[in-house]
Amino acid sequence: MTLDWTAFTPASALLGGLVIGGAAALLVLLGGRIAGISGILGGLLRRVPGERGWRLAFVAGLLISPWIYAAVAAPLRPRIDAGWGLLLVAGLLVGIGTRYGAGCTSGHGVCGLSRLSWRSAVATAVFMVAGFATVFVLRHLF
């Protein structure tokens, strides 16, 4: 494995991590809520009374932030080496895994680990191992 030093951006990664961690901390400290995307979106779809406003604001922030970034910095040019069919299957599998794992990577990996949750540590380890195995199989066996 080699590191692409031209794409290695520790400063922006650190800044992004600080923003995500700070937002998660504020949401739990000020609102008593976990910043797990699947839970936030699921609660929005269930239309829980009194919950709609902050959930809409959170999702809107996720959707608007790439345009804000593009307004102040050079837009990123992502490269996706998969077709629509594979992306749809992958999204479906992630959704199923999120239901079985009782949360997503943001809920378990960011919020659960910071609360020293054993269940979140196990879930995050399973997410990571499954991701490593998937990349290995797709890149080296197919």
Image: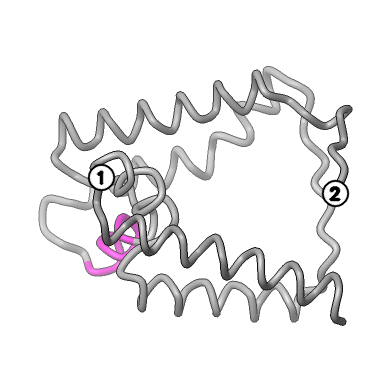
Q: Amino acid at mark 1?
A: Leu
Image position, residue 66 (x, y; %): 62, 36
Q: Which mark is residue 66?
A: none
Neighbour class for label 2 at 10 Å: few (<14), some, many (≥20)?
Answer: few
* Image height of 51 relative to 65, above or below: below
Quadrant where the C terminus is found in the figure: bottom right
* Image height of 92 relative to 51, above or below: below
Q: Main secondary structure of the magenta part?
A: helix
Asked whether 43 or 47 is in front, the reply is 43
Q: Which residue is mark 2?
A: 1
Say left or right for 15 vs 46.
right
Q: Report the number of discs.
A: 2
Picture quadrant where residue 91 is located: bottom right
Residue extent of the magenta highlight: 39-46
Q: Amino acid at mark 2?
A: Met
Question: Which residue lies at the image location 55% right of the left edge and 34% below the top edge?
Answer: 65
Asked whether 98 or 78 is in front, the reply is 98
Question: Which residue lies at the image location 50% right of the left edge and 30% below the top edge?
Answer: 17
Picture quadrant where residue 27 is located: top left
Say left or right for 48 vs 121.
left
Q: Which residue is mark 1?
A: 116
Image position, residue 101 (x, y; %): 36, 71
Picture quadrant where residue 129 is located: bottom right
Mark 2–mark 1 distance (CA, rounded to whole Å): 31 Å
Say left or right for 106 vs 4.
left
Image position, residue 6 (x, y; %): 88, 28
